[in-house]
Image (cartoon, rainbow, N blue to C red):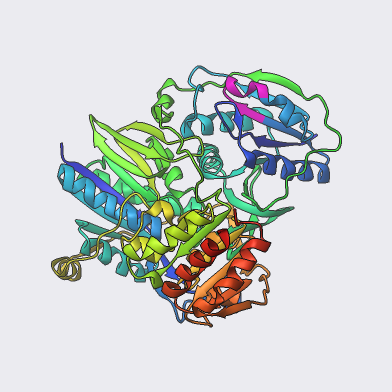
Amino acid sequence: MSTVLVVVEHDRGVLADATREALTAGRAIAAASSATLEALTIGSAADGLTADLAAFGVDAVHQAHHEILTDYGPEAWGEVVAQAVRLLSPEVVLATGTDRGNEVLAQAAARLDLPMVANCTVLAGDELTRVRWGGSLLEQTKLVAPVRLLTIAHHAIEVAPSDSAGAPEHDVFVPDLDPALVRSVVRERGQRVAGITLSTAPVVVGGGRGVGSAEAFTPLEELAGLLGGVVGCSRAVTNNGWRNHTDQVGQTGTRIAPTVYLACGISGAIQHWVGAMAAKNIVAINIDPDANMVTKAGYAVIGDLHEVVPAISAEIRRRGG
Amino acid sequence: MSLRVLVSVKRVPAPGARINLTADGQEVDTAHLGFTTSPHEECAVEAAVQLVEAHGGTATVLTLGRPEAEEQLRYAVSVGITSAVLLPIEGPDWDPQRTACGIVTAIRQLESAEGRYDVILFGNESADSAGFQVGIRVAHALGRPMVNGAKGIEVADGMVHVRRPSDAGEEAYALPLPAVVGVKEGINLPRYPTMKGRLASKRGDVTRLDVTAEPGGQQLVRLFRPPERLSQTTILGNGPDAAPAVVDLLEDLGVLA
């Protein structure tokens, strides 16, 4: 019987959401090919995840234990995956399409001298579909390999627990790790920034080149404050030094998914659009009725953001009392 | 201690609002597009220049790509890179395994001639194909530690100290040199070329190294566009007079406190 192996992403025992996507995808592949669905957890901190994995119909959990696996390390984790592949001979190995998932599977692929396909959305036989240009293009790709190493594009698959959650078997697997691999294990941790962030804010007020200067973001800050949201920006803005890169929405910035995105003076180039397209509602404020952001948005105001944004804030205040 | 730094970059199309494809779906139609250095790698170039400014030494830029990629190499020289190496290929992009193999061959040649690179930088992933693996494969082949996603790099005490953000807070790594690091945009704000830099980049030599490598197991079949979300845009109004309509909408969507 063949095996589909899912590499469980976790942070010191806390399951990453994206792992549920990989498990959902893994269960579908296993069902289609009458394979068993197995999971690999790395580090004893993840031993407690068995119940979460069982909910996704995992048949067996392999728990890798080693003294250098106390925290995340791309090389050590990649080596564990490579050894698990040699030991278990799975047909397919799935990891998360996240920074860590892609990094670990690439480390494993390098060690196994196998191809790896990042950020897949559709998995059918040896033809796969994967994401390019942040999702604005798709690639149909052919994979020729004795073991297929794939990561699942984040947010591409709807998470679905199994109808028949069982009680998976679990075994401890002690990889043979070179102690030198501790060289790339996390050394220290900083504190998580408190409060709402760009990726979790219910409202984002975005500004583009049309804002014109760093100072001219003040009215956008004010509107974001009234709405309990945060300010975002396009790459043109960060390149001009008007705002910090941590505010950048886009392919090389943050992906946002707010209830409302107010896109002010943003033309809507691909680079920006792929970071904003998951917003549930988009209101474009732009002087150009033909701007890409206006034609793609559900709602638009045609006008100068420098007049429109303060008027919206004034209207909110007026209604507030 | 002066540093020898190598930075690997990729020439990519610079699309505007829409990416068009060639009729055979094999690549992006670049007939009306400019080209640029992939964004993360633009920041890797800046990081390389800053490392050499801080520690002394040399920074070399390398690309595996069509001969036109010389434009991106010269741009890197114009912002302060010391020397440039082109690994020319013809035809379509190489797959990730083949690309990594070609780059490893070139690095071994360059290192045996000129000495070891203390730090090799890559971009986190390329803007166009985004395979998330070339730098990692190169690092493994060279037996060097590698961390991707760097938003901070400093060299001290024979180590490269790397910071990267994560959902759980910032992570700090310390890799013993020689090491490989994948850089993410936001680590710095790349500088613009100076007039002096532009002149230097026009005069400077680009070293060409011919490398060969076998194709890997991943093969592009075709590119296509996902179904577009067709939206009818509701115009809420013109100018500041539209404010009440916008606030009505915000109320309907439940985002007004």
Q: Please provide the residue range marked out in magenta.
A: A40-48
Residue at left offset 19%, top offset 47%: B52
Asked if residue A185 can be seen in this view, the reply is yes
Q: Residue furthest front?
A: A321
Q: Is residue A297 above or below residue B140?
A: below
**In the figure, residue B153 lies in which quadrant?**
top left
Residue B37 seen in render: no
Residue A48 percent across, percent down from the top left: 66, 22
* B218 sits to left or right of A73: right
Residue B2 left/right relative to A294: left
Determine if the magenta segment contains residue A46: yes
**Viewport quadrant of the N terminus of chain A:** top right
Residue A135 coordinates in the image, percent (x, y) = 58, 61
Left or right of B155, for residue B147: right
Of residues A115 and A161, which is closer to you in this image?
Answer: A161
Q: Position of residue B25 (x, y in %)?
A: 60, 73
Residue placed furthest toward the right = A164
Quadrant hosting residue B55: top left
Percent across and percent down for residue B90 are 43, 68
